[in-house]
Amino acid sequence: MNFHFTEEQQLLRDTVRSFVDKEIMPFIAEWDRQGKFDPELIPKLADLGLMGVCIPEKYGGSGMDYNSLAIVCEELERGDTAFRTAVSVHTGLNSMTLLQWGTEAQKQKYLVPQAKGEKIGAFGLTEPGAGSDVAAIQSTAVRDGDYYILNGQKTWISLCDSADHFLVFAYTDKSKKHHGISAFIVERTWDGFSSKAIKGKHGIRSGNTGELFFEDVKVPAENLLGEEGEGFKIAMSALDNGRFTVAAGAVGQIMACLEASVNYCHERETFGKPIGKHQLVQQMIANMEAGLQMSRLLVYRAGELKNEGKRNTRETSLAKWQACDFANKAADDAIQVHGAYGYSDEYPVERYLRNSKAPVIYEGTREIHTIMQAEYVLGYRQDKPLNKMLPAWENE
């Protein structure tokens, strides 16, 4: 594995960092207080090619590799989790899934405008009674001539009020259990579709999260993604991409915690010396640095497998689990370093702690990933290669 950035990757990091410093950092504290999501940032991200960073150029993307996507997610989450989430959902869960599973007609109609950032994509899997237990979804899609009639509800959907297109999962045959789940591309403007934002969240307050409702929505049959009954498989492959971006974002949050803590260590003095001179403070700083480096290596290892078109469920699961746990611990320690000031929004670390909790839960809870890793080691779980897995940077 090459541990050095290419010139293109370094330029990408510098570009995204500059964007975050200019367009997010000066405003994010107030956006967070107001629970405000600024949709105007999405076109700005699109202008930089960041909404389709690892989508091939022939489909409107930038044609970069998966670790370039990781770099983007790191730097965006250094600004705030909400904006990394937007890229994770739009690119990781939706666009990359269309790239792997879509027909050419579906790619031209939906993927191309999404990769260009002209349209926004989201992902609808979770329901009020179905999170980790995907097979417990209640949404249904019944074939009626050239259409499927979609009914159901989704919750905790990022970009619920902002997205134009949604990948939605519903049962087409409940008797087959999870083998009876299918995936559909759904447009916001169709009759029977509605959405509602969730307010009062503990963290990621500047992100747009909410519920989707489908009441006899007529979905054209050509908007079936893959074949009937392939929905569970499609969802799991999508989560391999989404979890990768979440893990990369967690690296960015550790980085933000470390930067804030180091700066404060040089500003604050106790007992006649900078607090960075105290050994227990140094221990917290050292743990953040260790978590940062270990998490980044796990993420880039998964990214290399993705670049090679190899199955990476195990590696991505480990990266997501560990990076999110490290980020949560780094945020907790960052507040401790800041003392009482860390408990107020005068400094950003209290926001980091609030934001760090959701990634430990979504796209596979800590407990789900713990079980997955144990089952791999014990030999209870084995992955077969996915025939739809492609190197994202391949432009032929």
Image (cartoon, rainbow, N blue to C red):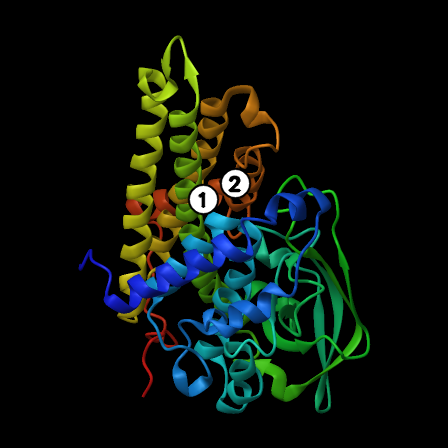
Q: Which residue lies furthest to the left in this view?
A: 1
Quadrant housing the N terminus: bottom left
**Is the residue marked by circle 2 packed among few (<14), some (14-19), or many (20+) residues within 10 Å?**
many
Residue 28 image offset from top left, x and y in percent: 60, 48
Q: How many labels does the image show?
A: 2
Residue 304 image offset from top left, x and y in percent: 27, 63
Q: Residue at x 56, y 64 (%)?
A: 178
Residue nearest the viewer, comparing 230 with 294: 294
Of the residues under marks 1 and 2, which one precedes in the sequence? 1
Q: Residue at x 48, y 53 (%)?
A: 21
161 vs 340, left or right, is right
Residue nearest the viewer, comparing 72 with 241: 72
Residue type at mark 2 is Ser
Residue type at mark 1 is Gln
**Residue with the mark numbered 2:** 356
Mark 1 vs mark 2, CA separation in Å = 8 Å
Secondary element at tag 1: helix
Secondary element at tag 2: helix
Q: Residue at x 44, y 32 (%)?
A: 329
Q: Tell me: residue 265, above or below residue 376.
A: above
**Residue with the mark numbered 1:** 253
C-beta proximity under 8 Å, tags 1 and 2:
yes
Residue 288 image offset from top left, x and y in percent: 36, 34
Residue 40 disc label: none
Q: Residue furthest top?
A: 271
Residue 85 image offset from top left, x and y in percent: 54, 56
Residue nearest the viewer, comparing 82 with 156: 82
